[in-house]
Every structure is written in structure tokens, then in C-alpha cells.
Image (cartoon, rainbow, N blue to C red):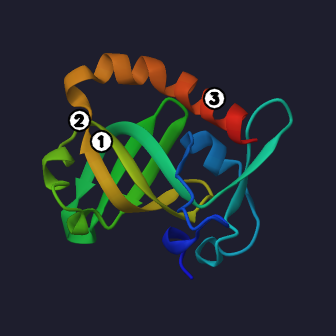
Amino acid sequence: MSTLERTYGDGKRAPPVKVLSGQLRAAGIRGAADSGEGYMIRAGRGRSLRVSLVWMQGTVMEVQLDRNTVLLMDETGTFAVQGVNNIPKGKPCLLPGKYVMVMGVVQAVSMEPVIRAVKMADLSEFAALHRQMWKLEVEELQQVLA
């Protein structure tokens, strides 16, 4: 069963967890991401949280459509997003300087985290507000989940 098909006992799909790239960079492996076990991140206050399907936000730094990849940067560093050519309506987001959200499956967590995109959306219209609120949103959700 893929991570996207993993469900709770009541049949509902597990929601994506909002994370920062720095949390993935420091993550520990808890089994293969596709196994549904995912990666363990520090969720603050000494708590850990298992993630595999994530929601991230950042500024597009580099676009490599021939490699099906974009490089994004949030306030804690850069991360790569793969599979961008397969995202419906995703192409308008793929311009350097755009502020975007990406939902996807964690593929790697080392020096530069890698996410396989499932959804992307352009948040540039209110980028200043989204950037300002993002870290607070991440912290709040992780406190609730951890």
C-alpha cells in the first residue's frame, strides 16, 4: 500500500503534515517512506512525529523541467520537488520567485530533502502573509499531532 493510500482505522486518508525543510534534513528514518512508516521529525518540546506525506511551502529558486524538478527554499533551507511535470495546473507555479505550496511524499531527507509532488499551488498573490504565517502553522499543527 502506498503512502497516499494509507488510511486511519475509520477508512479516512491520513492528512499531510506541515513541515519545514530543516526538520526533514534532521529527520531519522523509520522504515521506507513508501511502506507507510516514513521519517521521524522533531516536532518541538522533545516530541517526535512520523511523516511521509507532507505539506511544505517555499519560494521557487530553480526550475529544471527537463529533469522534472524544481528547487524551493523555505526559511530553514532548500528542498527539491520531483514530478512537477505531472501536476495538473502546476506549471503556472514553476517560475523563479513564485511562492508555492507543495503536497507530496518524502523521498529523501539527507542534505537536501526530496519530495515527490502530488499537488502544487501558487500562493504568490499573498506571499508576504503566507511566509509570515507558515512557521506558526507548522508549529501549531505539529503540537496537535504530536
Q: Element under label 2?
A: loop
Look at 53% across and 27% down and name the residue there.
137
Measured as percent of width and height from the top left, residue 4 is found at 49, 69
58 with respect to 146 (left or right):
left
Do residues under tags 1 and 2 come within 8 Å of each other at their CB atoms? Answer: yes
Nearest to viewer (mark 2 / mark 3): 3
Measured as percent of width and height from the top left, residue 99 is found at 29, 34
Residue tagged 1: 60
Residue tagged 3: 139
Spatial CA distance of label 2 from label 3 is 23 Å
Q: Element under label 1?
A: strand
| Quadrant (top left/top right/bottom left/bottom right) for the N terminus | bottom right
| Quadrant (top left/top right/bottom left/bottom right) for the C terminus | top right
- Given the image, on which type of amino acid does mark 3 rest? Glu
Q: Tell me the number on the disc at residue 35.
A: none
Look at 32% across and 56% down and name the residue there.
119
Look at 32% across and 67% down and name the residue there.
83
Label 1: few (<14), some (14–19) or many (≥20) C-alpha neighbours in 10 Å: many
Residue tagged 2: 98
Q: Residue furthest right?
A: 46
Which of the marked residues, 2 or 3, is nearer the chain's N terminus?
2
Q: Residue furthest bottom?
A: 1
Look at 37% across and 49% down and name the residue there.
102
Label count reads 3
Nearest to viewer (mark 1 / mark 3): 3
- Given the image, on which type of amino acid does mark 2 rest? Lys
Which of the marked residues, 1 or 3, is nearer the chain's N terminus?
1
User: Between residues 14 and 129, which one lies in front from this camera angle?
Assistant: 14
Q: Is residue 33 visible?
A: yes
